[in-house]
C-alpha cells in the first residue's frame, strides 16, 4: 500500500501566529489511496496544518508539494480546485439551504446566471448513491438531517469537487457506532478509487481499524512520520505527549477523607453530554477528572456549578441543594471556567473589579460599593497569589494568561469559597506560572477548601490530585487514588475507542 | 497613599480625552455662533439666557439619555423611549387623570413609564427576545395605545402646578434644568458608586462571566429596562409641562437622539463601557447645534443632516480607537493558537 505514489509531501513547514509558533517544522507524506492518520494533543498544530492544506492559512516557510508541484493555495476555493477537500469538525454546511445546494455551494451548475436546479439535484443524487446513501433527498434542508446525514453531505460536497485528497477532522466524533462503520466503508471505497484520506481522530482503536500510516504532531513539530498504524499504544502516546516541560508539583499533605463529604454529586445526567455521574469531594481534598475534550467533563463541571440544568440527578454542597449559579455561589462554590476570557473576565476592567466580581456586593454598604476596601482586599490577594505586576488597577487584558488565571482564582478566594471547580486551569499558562498555580491549589486544599479539577493533561491530574476519576464519553469509567495510576494507564482509558464499548474497567 | 494615586486606568484616560474632545466640539459650536451672530453675543444678558435655553431644551432628552446609557452599557438597546413618553404623557393628561391633580398626573406618568419598562424587561430577560426587536414592537404598540387613548387629539393640561414646572426658576435656573442635573447626578452615582452600576458594567461587558460569578443577569437586564422606563416617565412630565399639553406624536424620534447622544459620549454600543458625563455632553452638543440653527434662522433639514454627520464621525472615531487599541493588545498577548 505504501508503495503507491506520494501525492502530498510537506517538508519543514512553519507557521507563526503573532506570539506563537503554531507549526514549527512539520513533515507529512501522504500516498495515493491511503488513509493517513494525524495524531496529536489539542494545540499540537493539527488544525493549523489542515487549514494550510485547505487554503485558509498560508505557511510562512517550508515546502509543500502536491502531486509533484509546489502548492500554496491562496484561498479555500483554490485548494478545492486543486483537488483537496476538507471536512471540518464543525460541519461547515448552511443549515437553511437544501442538501443539493450545499453539495454544490460555490460551484453551482448554472446557465446565464440561473442555477440549474434539476441538474444539481440529479448530480447530487448520483454522488449520494455512490456514498451508499440514496435515501437522503437532495431537496431536504440541512437542518432537518441528523448528524450522520450532515456528514454524508459534507463528504458528497468533497466528491463534487472531484477531490483527490480528503481531509477529515474528527469525523467520528459526532457519529454513533453503526454510523462509524458506514463511514469506514465509505472511506475504504474512496481509497480503493485512489483517493487519499487524511484522518484525524483521538480514538486509537479507530486509527488501528481504518488507518494505514500515522503521523504524530506535538507542539507544532512532527515527532513521528509515517509510522505503521499497528504501532503499539505506548509508543504512539509517548510521541504525542513526550515531555514538553517538567511538571513541578509541590509535596502533598495527605487529607483526611473520613470527614463528611463537602460536595456530593448523585447520578447526574444531561442528554448527549454525560450520564449517571456520581462523585464526592471532601474538605481539603483535590479530586481530578481526566478526560479528553468532548468527554463531557466541562459540561459536568458547569452542571455541578448550576450553570447548566441537569436532566436528572442532584448536586449537594454541605447539605444544600444546588439549583443554580446563585445558590452555588451563595453556599461557597466557585468556578474557574475553561474559557477564561469569554467566560470569566471583564477584560477592560481593572484587576480588582475582576477579583471582586463575585463579592463586591458583600463589600458594599447599603448598595454603595466600597471600592477602596475592594482594592485593599484585592491587593492582599494579589500578594498571596504573587500576581505580577502587582497593580490591581490595571486592565486585566494587559496581564499574561497565568496572571489572568490567578485573578480568576483570586475572585473565589475573596468570596470565601469552600469548593473550587477548576476547568483546565493551566491552559495557555506558561511553565513558571503553572508551578505557582499548583502551589496555590495545594495551599487552598491545606486550608480545607475542596478542589475539583478537570484537565486534559494527564500528568497534571495525576500530580495534583489526591483522587482521580477517568471520564470517557460522558461516563466516569474509573476511580482510584492518584498514586495507584500511571500516565499510560490513564491515557489508555481516556483514549479507548467507542468501538470497544462496554469494557469499562 | 499609593492606593489613591495609583496609575489612572487606561479606560479613564480614554474617557477624559473623549470628554475633552466633546468640550472642544461645544467650544467650536459656540465660536461658530459668535462668528455668525456677533451682535447677539455682544449682549451678556442674551448669552446667559441662551445658555439656559440650551440647557432647558436638553433637559427632557437628557433624562431619557441617562436611562438609555444604562441600557446600552448593560448590553441592550431601548427603541421605545419616545413611545413610552408619549403614552405616559397622554395617560397622565386624560381628563380622568387630571381630576386627581398634579400628584395624580406625576404618579400616573411614572407608573406608566415603569410598567412599560417592566414589560420590555420581562420580554427581553425572561422571554429571551432581542432587545432591538422587543422595544421596536413596543415603540409601535405604545404609540398606538397613546393614539387610542387620546383619540389622536392634543390633550391640554389644565393643571397649573404641572404647567408651571417648565416656566419656574429656582435661584435663576429653570426647574427643568434642576431636574436634569438631579437625574444626571443620581445616574452618575448609580453607575459609579453602587452595586447596581457594577452589575450593569459586568452584565454588558461579559454576560457569561457575570452569570458564572453568581450575578442574576436576567433580573438585572429586566431592571435596566425598568430604569429606562422610569426616566421616560420623568421626561413625559417635563415635556407635558413645557407644551402644557400631551399628544400621541410627542417625543418623536427621541430614541434616536438618546442613542446618538450616548454613543458620541463614548458608550460602547456593544455594551460594557460608557459614562453618564459623556452622554450629557452628547446631549449638549445636539441641543447646541439646534440652538445654533435657530439663532441663525436656518432650516431644520440642514440641521438633521449635520446631526447625522456628527453621529457617523463619532462612531467612526470610536471604532478606529477601539480597533487600534485592541489590535495593539492582541498582538502582544493574545496569540491565535490553532
Image (cartoon, coloured by chain):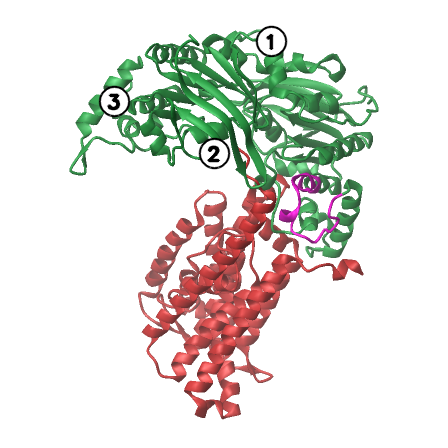
Chain colours: A green, B red
Mark positioned earlier in the residue sequence (2 or 3) = 2
Q: Quadrant of residue A279?
A: top right
Query: Distance of mark 3 from mark 1, alpha carbons?
Result: 42 Å
Q: Which residue is mark 3?
A: A124
Residue B209: % across, % down: 60, 42
Residue lying at the far left in this picture: please name it. Answer: A112
Circle 1 is placed at which residue position? A504
* Magenta stretch contains residue A402: yes
Q: Nearer the viewer, residue A59 or B208?
A: A59
| Picture layout, residue A500 above or below residue B51 | above
- Residue occupying the point 63% across, 8% down: A505
Q: Within the magenta stretch, is there residue B28?
A: no
The residue singled out by tag 2 in the image is: A59
Query: What is the secondary structure assignment of the residue under circle 1?
Result: loop
Residue B59 seen by the camera: no
Mark 3 and mark 1 in contact? Answer it, CB < 8 Å.
Answer: no
- Judge by depth and name the residue closer to the eye, A164 or A433: A164
Upstream in sequence: badge 3 or badge 1: 3
Q: Residue at x 39, y 81 (%)?
A: B294
Question: Given the image, what chain letter belongs to the residue carrying mark 1?
Answer: A
Magenta span: A387-407
Look at the numbered disc 3 and give the secondary structure of its residue.
helix
Residue A234: quadrant of the picture: top right
**SS at circle 2:** loop
Q: Which is closer to the viewer, label 3 or label 1?
A: 3
**Residue located 27% across and 15% down the image:** A129
Image quadrant where residue B260 sits: bottom left
Q: Along the polypeptide, which appears first: circle 2 or circle 1?
A: 2
B191 on left or right of A156:
right
Note whether B220 is above or below A270 in the view shown: below
Chain letter belonging to callout 3: A
Amino acid at each position: 500500500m505504501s508503495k503507491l505514489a506520494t501525492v502530498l509531501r510537506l517538508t519543514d513547514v512553519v507557521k507563526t501566529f503573532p506570539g506563537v509558533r503554531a507549526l514549527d517544522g512539520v513533515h507529512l507524506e501522504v500516498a495515493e489511496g491511503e488513509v493517513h492518520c494525524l495524531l496529536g494533543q489539542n494545540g499540537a498544530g493539527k488544525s493549523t496544518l489542515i487549514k494550510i492544506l485547505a487554503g485558509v492559512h498560508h505557511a510562512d516557510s517550508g515546502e509543500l508539494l502536491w502531486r509533484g508541484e509546489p502548492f500554496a493555495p491562496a484561498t479555500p476555493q483554490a485548494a478545492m480546485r486543486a483537488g483537496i477537500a476538507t471536512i471540518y469538525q464543525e460541519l461547515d454546511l448552511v443549515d437553511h439551504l437544501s442538501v443539493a445546494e450545499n453539495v454544490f455551494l460555490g460551484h453551482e451548475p448554472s446557465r446565464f446566471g440561473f442555477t440549474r436546479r434539476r441538474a444539481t439535484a440529479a448530480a447530487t443524487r448520483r454522488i449520494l448513491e455512490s456514498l451508499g446513501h440514496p435515501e437522503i433527498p437532495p431537496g431536504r434542508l440541512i437542518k432537518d438531517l441528523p448528524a450522520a446525514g450532515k456528514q454524508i453531505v459534507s463528504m458528497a460536497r468533497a466528491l463534487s469537487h472531484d477531490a483527490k485528497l480528503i481531509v477529515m477532522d474528527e469525523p467520528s466524533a459526532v457519529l454513533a457506532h453503526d454510523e462509524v462503520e458506514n463511514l469506514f466503508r465509505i472511506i475504504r471505497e474512496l481509497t480503493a478509487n485512489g483517493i487519499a484520506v487524511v484522518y484525524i481522530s483521538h480514538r486509537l482503536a479507530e486509527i488501528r481499524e481504518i488507518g494505514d500510516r500515522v503521523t504524530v504532531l506535538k507542539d507544532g513539530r512532527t515527532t513521528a512520520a509515517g509510522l505503521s498504524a499497528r504501532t503499539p499504544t505506548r509508543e504512539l502516546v509517548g510521541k504525542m505527549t513526550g515531555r514538553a516541560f517538567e511538571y513541578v508539583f509541590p509535596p502533598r499533605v495527605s487529607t483526611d477523607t473520613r470527614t463528611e463529604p463537602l460536595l456530593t454529586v448523585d447520578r447526574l445526567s444531561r442528554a448527549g453530554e454525560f450520564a449517571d455521574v456520581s462523585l464526592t469531594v471532601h474538605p481539603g481534598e483535590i479530586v481530578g477528572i481526566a478526560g479528553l475534550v468532548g468527554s463531557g467533563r466541562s459540561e459536568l463541571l458547569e452542571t455541578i456549578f448550576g450553570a447548566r440544568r441537569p436532566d436528572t440527578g442532584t448536586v449537594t454542597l454541605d447539605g444544600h441543594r444546588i439549583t443554580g449559579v446563585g445558590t452555588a455561589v451563595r453556599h461557597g462554590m466557585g468556578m474557574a471556567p475553561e474559557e477564561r476570557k469569554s467566560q470569566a473576565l471583564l477584560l477592560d476592567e481593572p484587576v480588582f473589579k475582576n477579583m471582586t466580581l463575585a463579592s463586591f456586593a458583600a463589600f458594599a454598604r447599603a448598595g454603595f460599593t466600597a471600592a477602596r476596601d475592594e482594592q485593599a482586599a484585592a491587593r492582599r490577594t494579589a500578594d498571596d497569589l504573587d500576581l505580577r505586576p502587582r497593580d490591581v488597577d490595571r486592565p486585566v487584558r494587559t496581564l499574561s494568561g497565568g496572571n489572568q488565571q490567578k485573578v480568576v482564582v483570586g475572585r473565589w478566594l475573596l468570596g470565601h469559597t469552600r469548593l473550587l471547580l477548576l476547568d483546565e486551569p493551566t491552559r495557555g499558562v506558561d511553565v513558571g506560572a503553572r508551578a505557582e498555580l499548583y502551589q496555590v491549589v495545594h495551599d487552598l486544599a491545606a486550608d480545607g477548601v475542596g478542589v475539583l479539577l478537570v484537565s486534559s493533561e494527564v500528568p497534571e491530574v495525576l500530580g495534583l490530585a489526591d483522587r482521580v476519576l477517568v471520564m470517557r464519553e460522558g461516563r466516569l469509567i474509573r476511580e482510584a487514588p492518584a498514586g495507584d495510576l500511571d500516565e499510560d494507564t490513564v491515557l489508555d482509558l481516556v483514549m479507548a475507542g467507542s468501538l470497544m464499548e462496554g469494557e469499562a474497567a | 497613599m499609593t492606593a489613591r494615586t495609583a496609575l489612572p486606568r487606561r479606560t479613564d484616560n480614554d474617557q477624559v480625552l473623549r470628554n475633552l474632545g466633546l468640550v472642544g466640539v461645544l467650544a467650536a459650536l459656540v465660536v461658530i455662533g459668535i462668528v455668525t451672530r456677533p451682535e447677539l453675543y455682544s449682549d451678556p444678558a442674551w448669552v446667559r439666557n441662551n445658555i439656559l435655553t440650551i440647557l432647558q431644551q436638553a433637559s427632557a432628552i437628557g433624562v431619557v439619555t441617562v436611562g438609555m446609557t444604562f441600557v446600552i452599557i448593560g448590553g441592550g438597546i431601548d427603541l421605545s423611549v419616545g413611545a413610552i413618553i408619549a403614552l405616559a404623557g397622554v395617560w397622565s393628561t386624560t381628563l380622568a387623570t387630571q381630576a386627581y391633580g398634579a400628584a395624580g398626573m406625576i404618579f400616573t406618568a411614572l407608573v406608566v413609564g415603569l410598567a412599560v419598562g417592566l414589560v420590555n424587561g420581562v420580554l427581553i430577560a425572561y422571554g429571551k427576545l432581542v432587545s432591538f426587536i422587543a422595544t421596536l414592537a413596543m415603540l409601535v404598540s405604545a404609540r398606538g395605545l397613546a393614539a387610542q387613548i387620546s383619540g389622536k387629539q392634543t390633550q391640554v393640561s389644565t393643571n397649573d402646578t404641572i404647567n408651571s414646572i417648565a416656566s419656574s426658576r429656582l435661584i435663576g435656573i429653570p426647574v427643568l434644568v434642576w431636574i436634569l442635573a438631579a437625574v444626571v447626578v443620581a445616574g452618575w452615582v448609580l453607575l459609579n458608586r453602587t452595586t447596581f452600576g457594577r452589575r450593569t458594567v459586568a452584565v454588558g461587558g461579559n454576560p457569561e462571566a457575570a452569570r458564572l460569578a453568581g450575578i442574576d443577569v436576567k433580573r438585572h437586564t429586566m431592571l435596566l429596562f425598568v430604569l429606562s422606563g422610569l426616566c421616560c416617565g420623568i421626561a413625559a412630565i417635563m415635556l407635558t409641562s413645557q407644551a402644557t399639553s400631551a399628544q400621541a406624536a410627542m417625543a418623536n424620534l427621541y430614541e434616536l437622539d438618546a442613542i446618538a447622544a450616548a454613543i458620541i459620549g463614548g458608550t460602547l454600543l456593544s455594551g460594557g463601557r460608557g459614562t453618564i458625563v459623556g452622554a450629557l455632553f452628547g446631549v449638549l452638543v445636539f441641543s447646541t447645534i439646534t440652538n445654533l440653527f435657530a439663532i441663525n434662522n436656518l432650516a431644520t433639514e440642514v440641521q438633521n443632516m449635520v446631526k447625522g454627520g456628527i453621529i457617523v464621525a463619532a462612531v467612526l472615531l470610536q471604532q478606529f480607537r477601539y480597533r487600534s487599541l485592541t489590535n495593539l493588545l492582541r498582538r502582544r498577548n493574545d496569540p491565535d493558537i490553532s
